[in-house]
Image: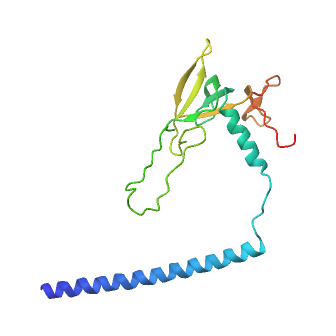
Amino acid sequence: MKKVLALVAVALFATLFIVGCGQNKSVVAENKAVAAQQDVYNKTQPAPFFQYSLARDLWIQFYKAQNQAVSTWTYITDQFGIVRFETPSQGYPIPYDTQLTNPLQVYDPGYRDSSVIEQPEPNGLFTSKNTDGTIVMALNPDGSFSPVYTELKATAFPFPVHQEKDQWGNVVWVRDKDGKPTIVLKPKGQ
């Protein structure tokens, strides 16, 4: 009986090995085909190269501005877009599970490892990608701020807005005519 079980185990292992090798060959062949196609694209349609990136420039300006004391106006809305809370605020809402320390660590630094760990943003935070929870720094009448936690959608504007109905009866955000923005970004050369 033991010999039969051993033969069945060997046959099963051999079958799985052969099937596994076949899959590996097909994966290798597919990878080669994709790489060959990508080589054609790189030769005939190379990615553009820019000396200047408007998007990056504006993002850097925004990043610097949001790290300053910037007044915003935040509106917390439900799933239907109905405003449930509004407040003058400081900066932009922050995902609730943003961390001050790196949440990922190398398991065994002495072992050869190709793990990728997250790096902090220049503001020192590890920004979340996983939560619906948000903290809004709401302005108090005395000029201090209080954190408001919400799992509803939070929208912050760098200028005052209000809601109106458009010509079809939809509720839309409208910028207040006299509201001056607290953040102004200018492309290079302007």
Identify which residue is drawn at 49% across, 83% down: 25
Total labels: the figure holds 0
Q: Percent x, y for residue 52?
A: 79, 52
Vertical side of 66 occupied by 23: above or below: below
Occupied quadrant, residue 95: top right
Q: As drawn, which residue projects farthest toward the right?
A: 190
Identify which residue is drawn at 63% across, 32% down: 92
Q: Is residue 27 left or right of residue 35?
A: left
Q: Percent x, y for residue 78?
A: 58, 33
Quarter of the rendering occupied by the N terminus: bottom left
Q: Is residue 57 left or right of residue 34?
A: right
Q: Nearer the viewer, residue 120 or 157?
A: 120
Q: Is residue 24 left or right of residue 49?
A: left
Vertical side of 65 occupied by 187: above or below: below
Quarter of the rendering occupied by the C terminus: top right
Q: Nearer the viewer, residue 62 or 119?
A: 119
Q: Percent x, y for residue 171?
A: 71, 33
